[in-house]
């Protein structure tokens, strides 16, 4: 039975080659006059993208300044730096030029500038809800997080090691410029970690205890199969434009809530457990998800057996075994084979981290604190359950 849902995805998508040249006129169309350009490392400069963006802003007659140095698992101190800069420069529009970490940072700065008398970290600790947010837009360079169309952002507080997410429709970007050619210079590991993250955004919505719709399942399964196909292509031919385009568009569809319409809100425990792993060990997010997922899956599949059987058949192409349990387990094993095929880890050892028992308990405790009452849909997890999953992944 389908659950009630409200689908809201207002972000305007401008897709294709050379579309970054439109950024200035688009910002002006959405009322921006003083722009803070947020970006990451040297690649945006070295590739000439930042120069092209700046030229487009100049041609539109827009004042702009920049904040660089955003890192993966973006830091709260960079957000605070951006808020201070934005206040000094009287910024009224945020433009993220990069991937999910850059866009998430831009969203957090936008929250902080809109409510300067309040601590932005309170949002990520879920102490309060945002009432305002400055407009945000993006020029996407990494297909992964889906932040270019989503209501989500994730920030890490390096003072206490907490990695926390916050969702609010106020932060959905006004527009997203998506040129697949901008992703062709990514290292293979980053490309495939991005593909893993894209798939996981839909898988988190797929493995639920109820409310699934046939049409939503068809969209989800088609997206997963498409990303797997094109992740394999990009692993051997990173310059394939069509494969880049498929993956880039899938990244947006996977996290704008389309592939969860009619369910009970999704599971998202692999993500939440990886957030603690990323907060403690600063691992690549998509790779961390791959290292956690199959161990979560083997721990919960009996409580969500029909969904795991359907996944094995329709996504992984597994033939029916003697029992549904065996079919489900074959599907999980097939996903591990796919991760290895594209160079992703399937456990913490392959990820390169070796948490102690005390660290695994600490991650589980932090995860419970961050989740509140929502600790999964496929199976509701306790702190002890999470410790067991971390232990399984750590063997």
Image (tube, helix red, strand yellow):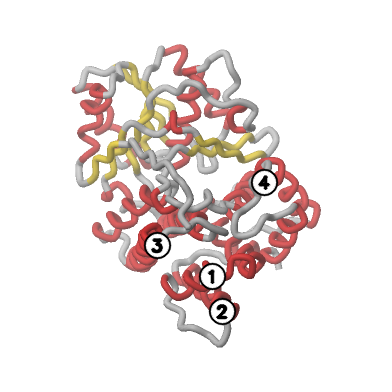
Q: Looking at the figure, which quarter contains the C terminus?
A: bottom right
Q: Mark 1 or mark 4: which is in front? A: 1
- Please tell me whether residue 349 is drawn above or below residue 252 in the rendered image: below
Direction bottom: furthest residue: 322
Q: Position of residue 229 (x, y in %)?
A: 35, 68
Q: Residues within 10 Å of mark 4 (few under 14, many from 20)?
A: some
Q: Nearer the viewer, residue 101 or 168?
A: 168
Q: Residues within 10 Å of mark 3 (few under 14, many from 20)?
A: few
Residue under the point 56% across and 87% down: 322
Residue under the point 36% across and 29% down: 95
Query: Can you identify the residue that label 1 sits on?
Result: 306
- Please tell me whether residue 232 is drawn above or below residue 220 in the rendered image: below
Q: Secondary structure at mark 4?
A: helix
Query: Who comes first in sequence, dot 1 or dot 3?
Result: 3
Residue under the point 24% across and 37% down: 20
Residue under the point 56% across and 79% down: 324
Q: CA distance from mark 2 to mark 4?
A: 37 Å
Query: Can you identify the residue that label 3 sits on?
Result: 214
Q: Position of residue 147 (x, y in %)?
A: 42, 41
Query: Who comes first in sequence, dot 1 or dot 4?
Result: 4
Task: Please give the label number shown on residue 280.
Answer: 4
Query: Can you identify the residue that label 2 sits on?
Result: 324
Q: Are the two marked residues, 2 and 1, in contact with CB atoms closer than 8 angstroms?
A: yes
Q: Position of residue 191 (x, y in %)?
A: 40, 56
Q: Are the two marked residues, 1 and 4, in contact with CB atoms closer than 8 angstroms?
A: no
Q: Nearer the viewer, residue 311 or 80?
A: 311
Query: Who comes first in sequence, dot 2 or dot 1?
Result: 1
């Amino acid at each position: 039975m389908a659950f009630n849902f409200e689908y809201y995805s207002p972000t305007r998508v401008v897709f294709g080659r050379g579309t970054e040249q439109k950024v200035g006129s688009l910002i002006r169309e959405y009322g921006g006059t003083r722009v803070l350009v947020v970006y990451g490392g040297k690649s945006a400069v070295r590739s000439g993208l930042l120069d092209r963006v700046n030229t487009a802003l100049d041609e539109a007659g827009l004042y702009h300044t920049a904040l660089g140095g955003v890192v993966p698992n973006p830091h709260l101190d960079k957000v605070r730096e951006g808020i201070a800069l934005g206040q000094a420069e009287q910024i009224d529009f945020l433009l993220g030029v990069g991937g999910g970490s850059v866009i998430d940072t831009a969203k957090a700065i936008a929250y902080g500038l809109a409510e300067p008398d309040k601590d932005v970290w309170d949002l990520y600790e879920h102490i309060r809800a945002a009432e305002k947010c400055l407009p945000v837009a993006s020029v996407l360079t990494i297909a992964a997080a889906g932040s270019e169309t989503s209501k989500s952002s994730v920030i890490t507080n390096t003072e206490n090691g907490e990695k926390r997410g916050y969702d609010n429709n106020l932060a959905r970007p006004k527009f997203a410029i998506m040129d697949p050619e901008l992703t062709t210079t990514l290292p293979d590991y980053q490309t495939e970690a991005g593909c893993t993250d894209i798939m996981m955004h839909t898988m988190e919505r797929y493995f639920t205890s109820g409310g699934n719709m046939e049409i939503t399942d068809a969209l989800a399964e088609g997206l997963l199969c498409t990303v797997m196909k094109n992740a394999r292509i990009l692993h051997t031919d990173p310059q394939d434009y069509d494969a880049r385009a498929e993956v880039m568009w899938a990244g947006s569809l996977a996290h704008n809530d389309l592939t969860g319409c009619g369910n009970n809100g999704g599971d998202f425990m692999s993500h939440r457990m990886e957030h603690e792993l990323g907060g403690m060990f600063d691992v690549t997010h998509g790779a961390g998800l791959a290292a956690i997922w199959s161990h979560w899956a083997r721990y919960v599949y009996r409580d969500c057996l029909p969904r795991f059987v359907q996944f094995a058949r329709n996504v992984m192409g597994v033939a029916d075994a003697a029992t549904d349990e065996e079919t489900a387990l074959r599907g999980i094993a097939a996903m591990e084979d796919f991760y290895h095929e594209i160079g992703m880890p399937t456990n913490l050892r392959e990820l390169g981290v070796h948490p102690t028992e005390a660290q695994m308990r600490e991650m589980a405790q932090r995860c419970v604190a961050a989740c509140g009452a929502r600790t999964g849909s496929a199976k509701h997890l306790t702190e002890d359950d999470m410790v067991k999953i971390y232990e399984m992944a750590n063997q």
